Every structure is written in structure tokens, then in C-alpha cells.
Amino acid sequence: MEFVRDYNKTAIIYEGRNISYKEMITKAKIFSSQVLIENEDRVIIYMENRPEFLYSFLGVWDKSGTCVC
């Protein structure tokens, strides 16, 4: 994932839990590997605000898709 780098820092604080950039990138890559989309496909993400939203959002971007939230 070239657009997000691991700065060895906290990326998200959710319910008192610190999530690092490395963990966020890893989980976004896992999501990206499981999604079957083509370049510039539109993907709807309907989810409450939580870390999984960012994982899915970045996973779609990793596949060069467009997120519609």
C-alpha cells in the first residue's frame, strides 16, 4: 500500500485501544485480497464509524476502486 506508510505511530484510537499504522495496513491488505473488484469499480460501504470502516475503505483504494460511503 503506497499511499499509507508505517510511521511506527498510532493511526487510530478506538475505545481506548491504539491501532498502529502497521496493523491498519495489514488489515486493509487482508480486506483487499478478499474483495473481487476491478480498477475504478464503485463500492458502497455502509457501516458505523469503527476501525473496520477504514480497513475496508483503504482496501478498496488499494485495488484502485472508488468508495461510496
Image (cartoon, rainbow, N blue to C red):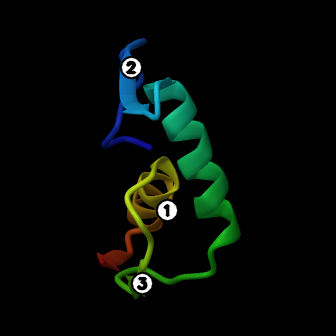
Residue occupied by mark 1: 56
**Residue 34, position as x, y percentages in the image:** 70, 68
Q: Along the line of sight, which residue is nearer the eye, 69 or 28?
A: 69
Give the mark nearer the N terminus: 2 vs 1: 2
The residue located at (46%, 34%) in the rendering is 15
**Left or right of 35 on screen, residue 10:** left
Q: Quadrant of residue 12?
A: top left
- Percent x, y of residue 64: 38, 69
Q: The residue tagged with tag 2: helix, strand or loop?
A: strand
- Taking depth in this image into account, of 52 and 56 the one nearest to the observer is 52
The residue positioned 52% from the left and 26% from the top of the image is: 22
* Callout 3 secondary element: strand
Does the residue at mark 2 contact the one at mark 3 (Cβ under 8 Å)?
Answer: no
Q: Identify the residue at horizontal 42%, vertical 12% (top origin).
A: 8
The disc labelled 2 sits on which kind of residue? Answer: Thr
**15 vs 18: above or below:** below
**Image quadrant containing the N terminus:** top left
Count neighbours of disc 2 (C-alpha within 10 A) and say few if under 14, some if 14 to 19, many if 20 or more. some
For the C terminus, the quadrant is bottom left
Q: Residues within 10 Å of mark 3 (few under 14, many from 20)?
A: some
Q: Nearer the viewer, residue 26 or 50?
A: 50
- Residue at horizontal 49%, vertical 53%? 55
**Does 30 appear above or below 23?**
below
Residue 10 has which mark? 2
Q: Quadrant of residue 68?
A: bottom left
Q: Identify the secondary structure beneath mark 1.
A: helix
- Residue, disc 3: 43
Distance Cα–Cα, label 1 vs label 3: 10 Å
Where is 37 relative to 28, above or below?
below
| Place of residue 3 in the rendered image (x, y in percent of width and height, measured from the top left) | 31, 43
Q: Position of residue 27 (x, y in %)?
A: 60, 45
- Looking at the image, residue 61 lies above or below residue 43: above
